[in-house]
Image (cartoon, rainbow, N blue to C red):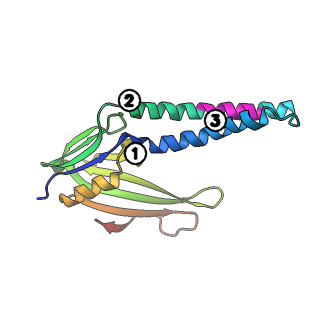
Amino acid sequence: MTQGIIIQSSSLRVASLPIIWFGFELVFPALYILTIHHAPHISAPFKAVFAAAAVFSGLLALRSLMSIWRIWKADGDWTARVGDGRLTWNAPVPCPGLPLDLPLAEIAEAVRLEVSTTDREGATDVETRYELRLTDGRVMAFDRETSGLDPHRVFSALARHGISYALWTQDLTRDSRDRSPVMDTAY
């Protein structure tokens, strides 16, 4: 049997996406304050519309800032350990399904499902879902944002310990003929 595998992530790595969103959400309020508010050639109704949009964007930035603050103030580390017959996945910021301490014998398989869909404009979107399917029939779903770690890394570690891990694809786009999930790769 393989030795224990530990996967870790720092607070900065976990907070990187909210930090990026915070920067984008501050652009419009800054643009309003620096340019539109002082422009004499823009009429008052348009300034009011821009001000409302700037306030809304500022509220979104505040929400992102609160998320960043919660991540920085969390006690503990984002770690997953596969070994000694157990999967232990710690997330100091509680999220659905985590923290998790589960015997490997209870895990039937790990699945990454990539679903392709067509949006209104005709563009193809790919949504990735990570699932642990347990022997009692339950399914636990994870995503990259809330878990703090890339589930693919954790599931690959499970595969090294004998748990089957497979990539399934499902084509739900507008012109697809076969909409059933198809196994693509086994790790």
Which amino acid lies under the numbered mark 3 shown in the image of this protein? Ser
Q: Earlier in the sequence, mark 3 or mark 2?
A: 3
Q: Quadrant of residue 153?
A: bottom left
In x, y percent, where is residue 164?
Answer: 24, 60
- Rounded to the nearest angstrom, the CA distance separating label 3 from label 1 is 24 Å
Span colored in magenta = 49-59
Q: Is residue 51 shown in magenta?
A: yes
Q: Quadrant of the C terminus?
A: bottom left
Which amino acid lies under the numbered mark 2 shown in the image of this protein? Lys
* Residue position for label 3: 57
**Which residue appears at 35% of the width and 63% of the height?**
167
* Residue position for label 1: 13
Query: Looking at the picture, does residue 16 appear above or below residue 73?
Result: below
Picture disc at residue 142: none
Q: Earlier in the sequence, mark 2 or mark 1?
A: 1
Q: Is residue 155 left or right of residue 42?
A: left
In x, y percent, where is residue 183?
Answer: 35, 67
